[in-house]
Image: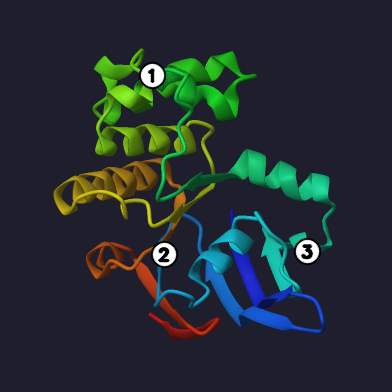
């Protein structure tokens, strides 16, 4: 899956003619199978860019090409279908459902595809959670909960995974373990990985880094 953003913008209109430009003419290409880190201070537009690239929101200007097709021209239903089938998400908070087991949480994105159960079990095994399948989220450590969220993001076999500060709530040692697992899983499966992070050590593990400031692209390495 190739993603090319051409001069995309995002504005929020607050009434009384007040417009806030969160993103200003950003152009970027996500190459198939690469790992890209997005860095910058708070309020730079990192998460806004991630949400647009992941089709969680629509730009107010520019073009967003998904495999050569301008997704901005797609209907809401088509937008949602691309996101559902091809894009995975991993956030700073794990957002696990407390009344569902570990395995059930992982299976949520593919609930109507029982054939994915074996893949979910295999993912949890690779992530060191084979003995936790029937445990509830409240019985897990923070690192374990984030690994469950990672398995949930990967189980449908996305073409690209969008990660927003995926280890921001973990201590450094646990965070490094989760980061290494995330990077290795995406590399082994050929999944493009886009990571928003404040952590230069995590960004250094990516194949490419962009830096943002005030809604604009500052550095593209």
Q: Is residue 115 left or right of residue 85?
A: left
Determine the CA span between mark 2 and mark 3. Answer: 22 Å
The quadrant holding residue 184 is top left
The label on residue 36 is 2
The label on residue 121 is 1
Q: Position of residue 141 (x, y in %)?
A: 24, 32
Marks 2 and 3 close (CB-CB < 8 Å): no
Q: Earlier in the sequence, mark 2 or mark 3?
A: 2
Q: Earlier in the sequence, mark 1 or mark 3?
A: 3
Q: Which residue is mark 3?
A: 72
In-front residue for pair 31/6: 6
Q: Is residue 147 left or right of residue 88?
A: left
**The C terminus lies in which quarter of the figure?**
bottom left
Q: Position of residue 105 (x, y in %)?
A: 47, 25
Image: 58 above or below 147: below
Marks 2 and 1 close (CB-CB < 8 Å): no
Image: 214 above or below 209: below
Image: 216 above or below 46: below
**Dot 1: element:** helix
Marks 1 and 3 close (CB-CB < 8 Å): no
Q: Position of residue 96 (x, y in %)?
A: 45, 32
Tell me the crowding category of disc 1: few under 14, some 14 to 19, or many 20 or more residues within 10 angstroms, Cα based: some
**Dot 2: element:** strand
């Amino acid at each position: 899956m190739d993603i090319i953003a051409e001069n995309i913008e995002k504005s929020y209109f607050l009434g009384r003619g007040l417009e806030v430009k969160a993103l200003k003419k950003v152009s970027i290409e996500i190459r198939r199978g690469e790992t890209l880190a997005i860095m910058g201070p708070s309020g730079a537009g990192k998460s806004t860019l991630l949400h647009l690239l992941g089709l969680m929101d629509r730009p107010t200007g520019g073009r967003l090409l998904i495999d050569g097709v301008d997704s901005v021209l797609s209907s809401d239903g088509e937008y949602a279908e691309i996101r559902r089938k091809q894009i995975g998400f991993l956030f700073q908070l794990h957002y696990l459902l407390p009344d569902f087991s570990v395995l059930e949480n992982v299976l949520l994105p593919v609930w109507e595809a029982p054939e994915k159960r074996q893949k979910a079990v295999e993912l949890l095994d690779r992530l060191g959670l084979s003995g936790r399948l029937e445990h509830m989220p409240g019985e897990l450590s923070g690192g374990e909960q984030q690994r469950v969220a990672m398995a949930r993001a990967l189980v449908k076999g996305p073409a690209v995974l969008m990660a927003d500060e995926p280890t921001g709530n973990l201590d450094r040692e646990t965070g490094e373990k989760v980061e290494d697992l995330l990077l290795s899983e995406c590399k082994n499966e050929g999944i493009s990985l886009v990571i928003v992070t404040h952590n230069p050590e995590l960004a250094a593990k990516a194949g490419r880094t962009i830096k943002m400031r005030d809604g604009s692209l500052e550095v593209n390495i």
